[in-house]
Image (cartoon, grey):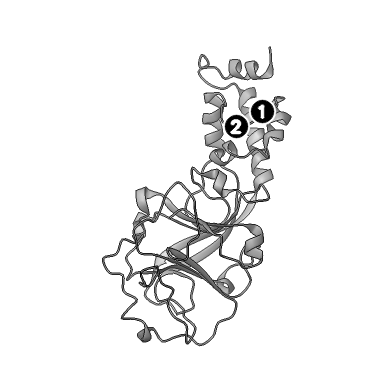
Amino acid sequence: MGVWQWLQTIFSEGEDRLTDKQLTRLENFAQAVKTATARQVIHIQALPSANLSITDSKFGGIPYLPKGATLPTARNGKPLFMLAQINCSQLLENNIYPRKGLLQIWVAANGKYAGNQYYSYSPHTQRVIYYPTLEEATDYDKFKQVYQFEGKPLPFAPTKAYRLIFTQGTDTFSYEQLRFNHSLLPLWKTYFGEQRENFLLLPEKIAEKLKELLPTSRGHRIGGYSEVDDNAQAVGSDGLPKILLLRIDTDEKVGIRCKDNEAVNFLIEKDDFQALDFSRIQHSL
């Protein structure tokens, strides 16, 4: 009997549950996946706040604009909305973002704030701007009249601002990421002795247990891994998952509602991020 037939037999529908030996083997495999895919992540807690400075990290709120700068605009000339602003100096020490400067993500107020597919960057619908140094800011009164989004479909009320609290952690592959990644197939062979071409057709009992052992990550975050169906677009030219520049998740408790209770993800190639080139962002807007 071949290994694949053996696997189908020991995890067949006729068995009510996994034996201790089968479970241990799967647990060891899952732990090896976690070890191999560990990646630094910065978890974000977003709290409504009315007392934020122009240069603070935040979702929404009044954006920082250097003196003399103009608001980024969509094709129709309307201002984009500043979805997020990250002041790098307020982050804990990390290997993801630059150590200083300020990064902003701007989006068109068109209501498309989640999805399960990735799309290419377009300056007409989103803009990522990085300021390596901070200068004197433009007075908000100078652009307040045109920076109005009341009634526009956004993931949170345009008049709201959220203070961001950062904590460090580690993210690892979920079962869904494992399914679409071939780099870990040698691990499967190590633990089960079978050479597979992919992880897409595992016996149901194996798949269900791996979903439990390799759960999906939730919440706002920088770094780690994204969670969308279009995983092929989330892989960089080096064969590894792209850097998660930012993820904003649905958080009903504080009034953040992404479409269909999903999340907004922004991905970037490692080489592009190191060069601070934001012209090829992948996004799930």
Q: Secondary structure under badge 2?
A: loop
Number of residues whose C-alpha sits closer than 10 Å to that of mark 2, classed few (under 14), some (14–19) or many (20 or more): some
The quadrant of the rendering that contains the C terminus is: bottom left
User: Outermost residue toward the left?
Assistant: 151
Does the CB distance between marks 1 and 2 fall below 8 Å?
Answer: yes
- SS class, disc 1: loop
- The one nearer the camera, 137 or 280, is 280
Which residue sits at x=55%, y=23%? 203
Percent coordinates x, y for residue 166 in the rendering: 53, 64
List the residue tagged with mark 1: 196
Residue for badge 2? 199
Residue 132 x/y as whole percent: 60, 77
Residue 144 falls left or right of residue 266 = left
Figure quadrant of residue 251: bottom left
90 shown above or below 68: above
Residue 273 in the image, given as x and y percentages of width and height? 62, 63
